[in-house]
Image (cartoon, rainbow, N blue to C red):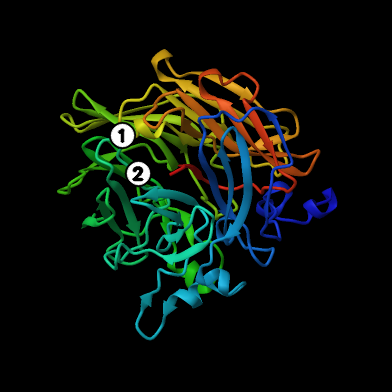
Amino acid sequence: MTNAQNADMPLHLAGNNAPVTEEVTLEPAEVIGAVPGELNGVYLRNGPNPRTGWSPHYFAGDGMVHAVALGGGRARWYRNRYVRTPLYEHPGESRFALAFDRATGQVDYRVSTANTHLVSHAGRLLALEEGGFPHEITPELETVGPFTFDGALHTPMTAHPKICPGTGELLFFGSRLRPPYLTYHRAAPTGELLQSQVVEVPRATMMHDFAITENHAIFMDLPVVFDPATAAAGGGMPWRWDDGHGARFGVMRRTGGPVRWFDVEPCYVWHTMNASETDGAITVIGCRVPTLWRDGPEDIGGGLPNLHEWRLDLAAGTVAERPLDDAAIEYPRVADAEVGRRHRFGYVTGFSLEAEPERSEIYKYDFAKGTTREVHRLPAGHTCGEAVFVPRRVTSGDDDGYLMTFAHDRSRGTGYLAILDAADLSARPVAEVHLPVRVPTGFHGNWLPGR
């Protein structure tokens, strides 16, 4: 894409945000370094890739999963495939028209972009997007179809469920645009839906993520609210900032019960890094912006996200919060073995709203040393997204493993999988698996160990 073409494109379709047009299966073109022999599995990442080549917003593109299979010290294959949802089958049609039955007032949650994240649980690989049901896909990226826990799920599913490393349970929530607005769910390690509890909130808000500890779930009721008038008029993203709504975190036992609400300073939080509880207090770490979309979804005057901490004192009912860093960052991750537990290391990617930033940086925070950070700087002209921690062994935590991310080399116009040593982040990549095709910027992904 030329600079002249980029100038005419909205940000979410410019540069490496632009969609690719083909689904391919191919062998990597080159490996620089050496793929670690203990890595046996598939790295997968989801993201928006509008089938028509255009979408009104970054969040609206059809889901496309990109994957690289590793094993035996080599990169075996790369694939990219659309998730075959009703929106994929009806390119360019209105999501509202496909999902909403005017005669009954019911919403068909099978209608989804399935473009945001991936989670593996109870032998199923699910492509997620918070407005609909998950869609099951295979490790080879073929679509199986909508998944509803044998018909027990009646709400959408967040794109950010949590798997408890202690119990193996899948914990998640579903947000709706009409009452009940918020429902909490808990699924067994074997896949059965064990619990669905309505959480009373006054209106529909854009609740993208949440957090868990070993005993609690933490919900974020924040001031980005649903605007029915904009939705009815078909005027684009129907979400707006509302100063009158307030901001609060809700704490509930994971097994259910009443919710305690803690007022926090107004903000929006796209993603939490983790939460833990010690000495009668819950600590939540996440990426915070002071405001979001105050004057509509094109308004970014609220600033870029920074790492932030909230400490909820369960006995006193108070909140202490503080910024942890002033760097613009997003896509926070910890080792899966540390989810809901006190962790030492956390990983984020530097964040920019430019179509073609100079380069990307990945940060490793050491919370045992006052949130000091180690930096991996990609070469000039190289950018990347979320860095996923992959353990060296199945139960490895903290930094005993690797970070994986898809990166883009602007000079070549192609993508590669970067494999970094999490214990020595500033070092050169352990391996770069270069591909003969471009991998567009995307959202979230995970590592699927080989079976």
The amino acid type of the residue labelled 2 equals: Lys
Image point 29% across, 68% down: which residue?
Answer: 151
Image point 26% across, 42% down: which residue?
Answer: 217
Residue 101, quarter of picture: bottom left
The reply, left or right, for residue 262 in relation to residue 43 is: left
Image point 48% across, 50% down: which residue?
Answer: 117
Image point 73% across, 41% down: which residue?
Answer: 356
| Residue that mark 1 sits on | 340
The amino acid type of the residue labelled 1 equals: Gly
Pointer 1: residues within 10 angstroms few (<14), some, or many (20+)? many
Relative height, residue 321 to residue 291 (above, below): above
Label 2 secondary element = strand
* Residue 243 shows up from this direction: no
User: Of the residues under marks 2 and 1, which one precedes in the sequence?
Assistant: 2
* Residue 315 shows up from this direction: yes
Quarter occupied by the C terminus: top left
Relative height, residue 447 to residue 48 (above, below): above
The reply, left or right, for residue 139 in relation to residue 189 is: right
For this rendering, which residue is in front, 367 or 307?
A: 367
Q: Position of residue 208 (x, y in %)?
A: 42, 50
Pointer 2: residues within 10 angstroms few (<14), some, or many (20+)? many
| Residue that mark 2 sits on | 162
Q: Distance between the Cα atoms at labels 2 and 1?
A: 9 Å
Label 1 secondary element = loop
Q: Position of residue 303 (x, y in %)?
A: 56, 38
Circles 2 and 1: CB atoms closer than 8 Å: yes
For this rendering, which residue is in front, 242 or 20?
A: 20
